[in-house]
Amino acid sequence: MRRLVTAPNLALATLWADMLTQAGFDANVQRAYASSIAGEVPPDQTLPEVWVMDDAQLEAARTLLAQLRHPPHRLWVCQACLERIDGPFEQCWNCGAAMPP
């Protein structure tokens, strides 16, 4: 069992662990409720962590999590109005046309 990453909050830790689990990794969240003792121990020691149960999967899980956290930047041109669309949008903000396949 190895720590993969420390998350800034419980919501992100849970989301990342769920995404890894759906991809076939045995991952879980540790220190989920440790924030209640912040102040008695250093705050950085109470942040939630995502752990991978199989040591052999650590690097593959780290690679996948990096890809999930930083998706490729997409730029496309609307075929209806020729507007340049930047980012994760699947619909033209100018005319409402769908992103081409």
Image (tube, rainbow, N blue to C red):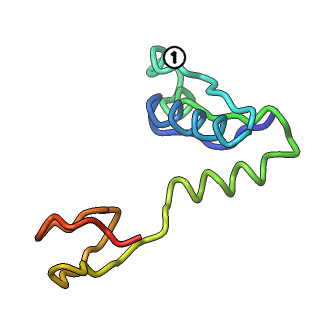
| Residue nearest the observer in this picture, 59 or 96 | 96
- Residue at left offset 35%, top offset 77%: 75
User: Which residue appears farthest toward the bottom when viewing the image?
Assistant: 82
Query: Within the image, what quadrant is residue 21 found in?
Result: top right
- Drawn side of residue 61 relative to residue 57, left or right: left
Residue 10 placement (x, y as % from top left): 47, 28
User: Which residue appears farthest toward the right when viewing the image?
Assistant: 56
Residue 80 placement (x, y as % from top left): 18, 79
Quadrant containing the C terminus is bottom left
Q: Which residue is mark 1?
A: 33
Quadrant containing the N terminus is top right
Q: Name the residue type under label 1.
A: Tyr
- Drawn side of residue 91 relative to residue 50, left or right: left
- Residue at left offset 53%, top offset 26%: 46
- Drawn side of residue 42 relative to residue 98, left or right: right
- Drawn side of residue 45 relative to residue 75, left or right: right
Residue 33 placement (x, y as % from top left): 51, 16
Helix, strand or loop under label 1: loop
| Residue nearest the observer in this picture, 41 or 36 | 36
Q: Is residue 47 above or below residue 34?
A: below
- Residue at left offset 55%, top offset 21%: 32
Count of picture labels:
1
Mark 1 surroundings within 10 Å by alpha-carbon count, few (fewer than 14), some (14 through 19), many (20 or more) = few
Residue 93 placement (x, y as % from top left): 16, 66
- Residue at left offset 11%, top offset 70%: 94
